[in-house]
Amino acid sequence: MDIDFTDIEYLKNPDSITLKADFQQFLLSLDVPTIIDITGINTHKTRVITTLLHGNEPSGLIAIHRWLTQDSELPTPETNIRIIIVSVEAANASPRLSRRYLTNGLDINRCFGSHLDHGYFKRANLIAKAIADVKPEAVVDLHNASGSAPAFAVSTLISTRCLSLASFFCDTIILSSLSLGTLTEQNFDCPTVTIECGGAKDEQAHTVAFQGIKALADCPDLDLYQQKNPVDIVYKPLRMKLKSHVELTYADQDEGNSGVTLSNKIEQFNFGSARKGQMFGWLDEQGLDNLELINEAGANVINDFFTTRENQLVCATHLRIFMATTNIEIATKDCLFFVVNMPSTDSI
């Protein structure tokens, strides 16, 4: 597929014919990244919502379409809303909504903040410019987790407004110090949060996204918003990754495979707890040398978090796990899961 990385379509207060009868028809009508501007009561402020940075994470699109079409007329939010639907080509590739990004393409959510200005990097730069152009008071980036999991937020800083944004969608926010080239890492002079709404096939994830969008749109003043529920803060997770060329499989028992074999029930640990001694899978003769867990100083601290029991991969301490997945493509190309050290059993 030949892609014009400079092409972006703009829609302003689209009518029902443009929005189609359902989100699938609407997605099919799109050819390139699409920006939808909805006029609010206060036209001097704009809030930005991005979605489909990954083509297999549909909750944001589903929720946005529902919000736009729930009544006979477009909603009138308290402020202007700019919606950016990004990886349209990947989302429309067959089978629809199954590809994170196109074959031979790049994950655009690893291309932001680069000095490069070609291909997906150019597209990321244009998306960032489309956000900065409206001088937003908040940016919310909607995603689905790679496995089934409760909703949570991610931000590179914690402020009162970040906590308020998170609370529209969930009750947990992760303070991340990772530098991956994501949209959330960019400075738009306003709070920016990623919302992992839950699993891509979970109806509850679509509901989380819809209710959050509606709450965000209906909030007259983010600075005066009174959170209904407290938001738990999780500090600075690390990414559990395979080393280069290590093979990965999933199974319910040790099958003697090369590399790393994770339990096919690994997703049950998502955003839960794993006690010291908990088994996650099995390793070949290379043991923990198959894996890396890089801290802020660039050191591999895998031995601080995991150990072996014979050839089993087990927790060396009490851990909190999230974004674990059995999607082998995501696990090998991105990461196996994220992990945070729990200070004591009282937190489990």
Image (spheres, grey):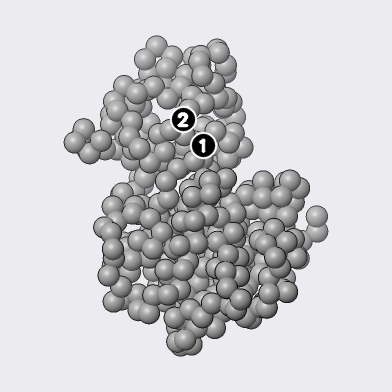
Q: Residue sitting at 72 percent across and 73 percent down?
A: 18
Q: Are marks 1 and 2 in contact (CB under 8 Å)?
A: yes
As helix, strand or loop, the secondary structure at mark 1 comes to: loop
Q: Residue sitting at 33 percent across and 54 percent down?
A: 171
The foreground one among 262 and 219 is 219
Question: Can you see residue 129?
Answer: no
* Rendered image: mark on residue 21: none
Q: Dot 2 corresponds to which residue? A: 266
Neighbour tally class for label 2: few under 14, some 14-19, many 20 plus, Cα within 10 Å: many
Q: Name the kind of residue labelled 2 in the image.
A: Ile
Above or below, 97 against 332 in this view is below
As helix, strand or loop, the secondary structure at mark 2 comes to: helix
Work out how far the residue at label 1 is from the one at label 2, CA to CA, in angstroms.
7 Å
* Rendered image: mark on residue 325: 1
Q: Where is residue 26 in the image (x, y as percent from the top left)?
A: 70, 64
Quarter holding residue 163: bottom left
Q: Name the kind of residue labelled 1 in the image.
A: Thr
Quarter holding residue 310: top left
Above or below, 234 against 337 in this view is below
User: How many numbered marks, from 0 up?
Assistant: 2
Q: Position of residue 56 (x, y in %)?
A: 62, 49
Q: Position of residue 25 (x, y in %)?
A: 73, 61
Q: Residue sitting at 46 percent across and 68 percent down?
A: 214
